[in-house]
């Protein structure tokens, strides 16, 4: 798989890639990345679905949010402008948080897939991510090395090199704002999950140390129509590194939601 920069469309402050035809699917990436991280999903899913992969505010070609110290809801409200009717929302990492938030606030979301989403971090994990956010606030550039070593064991992978490029070129202000939200949020509340009326898929990697399989199982068990999938031998960047398996599960889920 070659991870290339694809042409964007624009709506307001947002840039996004649009491909395919059929029911609408909105794809939301994680902190520090961009819409091109969904390249493998765009290739496989666009045969049957209209895909919009958004550059999160402050990432890729999207403008930063205009508010100081934005909340998760601020990000969700801006991204919601890309929802024009019944839509399936798929998010990865912080994008998973946003996907669940959009499902909670919009009746147009007819299915939500949260990939590598966090839920109720323990005190050690919570302290670690807060410390990383605090350290980031003092930096005048992004150093992707520590992040990449959390995500990959082989830095020579094409996926690792693509993530290195995106992390080095992301807007520093946009990255800091998004990472602060990601660090201080602890995943959807139990009430939010219990009130989700649409089908919900929670998928993560068996080797994922932060967005753990236990978290995905717990979120799925709390939803009225939740389901968990664990991808073997995969970790945080499974939508890129294990896209064949991930896409097969996504296609099955999307088909179930659009019958």
Image (cartoon, helix red, strand yellow):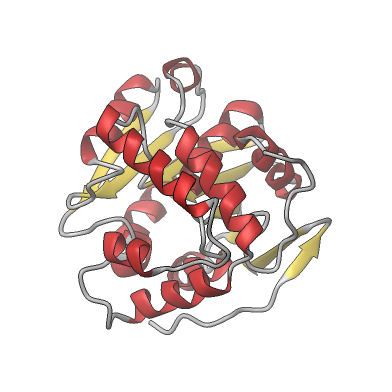
Front-most of 49 and 79? Answer: 79
Residue 241's quadrant in the figure? bottom left
What residue do we see at 64% from left, 56% from top? 174
For the question of whether residue 257 can be seen, the reply is: no
Give the tally of numbered discs: 0
Q: Residue at x 43, y 31 (%)?
A: 187
Can you tell which quarter of the image residue 200 is in?
top left
The quarter holding residue 16 reads bottom right
Q: Please, is residue 175 above or below residue 178 in the view?
A: below
Q: Position of residue 146 (x, y in %)?
A: 33, 63
In the image, 57 versus 22, the foreground residue is: 57
Q: Quadrant of the N terminus?
A: bottom left
Q: Position of residue 98 (x, y in %)?
A: 55, 40
Q: Residue furthest right?
A: 12
Give the left or right position of residue 147, taking residue 96 as reference. left
Residue 130: horizontal and vertical position, in percent? 42, 39
Q: Is residue 184 above or below residue 243?
A: above
Viewer-closest of 249 and 7:
7
User: Can residue 39 be seen by looking at this rendering?
Assistant: yes
């Amino acid at each position: 798989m070659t991870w290339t920069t694809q042409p964007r469309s624009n709506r307001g402050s947002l840039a996004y890639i649009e491909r395919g035809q059929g029911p609408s699917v909105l794809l939301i990436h994680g902190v520090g990345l961009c819409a091109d991280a969904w390249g493998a999903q765009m290739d496989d899913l666009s045969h049957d679905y209209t895909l919009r992969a958004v550059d999160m505010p402050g990432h890729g070609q999207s403008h930063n949010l205009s508010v100081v110290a934005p909340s998760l809801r601020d990000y969700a409200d801006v991204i919601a402008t890309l929802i024009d009717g019944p839509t399936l929302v798929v998010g990865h990492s912080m994008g998973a948080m946003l996907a669940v938030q959009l499902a909670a606030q919009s009746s147009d979301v007819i299915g939500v897939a949260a990939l590598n989403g966090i839920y109720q971090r323990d005190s050690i994990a919570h302290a670690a991510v807060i410390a990383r956010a605090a350290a980031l606030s003092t930096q005048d550039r992004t150093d992707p090395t520590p992040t990449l070593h959390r995500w990959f064991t082989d830095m020579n992978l094409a996926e690792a090199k693509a993530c290195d490029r995106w992390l080095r070129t992301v807007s520093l202000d946009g990255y800091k704002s998004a990472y602060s939200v990601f660090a201080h949020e602890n995943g959807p509340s139990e009430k939010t999950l219990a009130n989700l009326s649409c089908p919900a898929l929670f998928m993560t990697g068996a080797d994922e140390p932060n967005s753990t399989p236990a978290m995905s199982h717990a979120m799925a068990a709390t939803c009225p129509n939740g389901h968990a999938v664990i991808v073997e031998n995969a970790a945080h960047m499974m939508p890129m590194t294990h896209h064949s398996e991930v896409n097969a599960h996504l296609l099955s889920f999307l088909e179930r939601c659009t019958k």
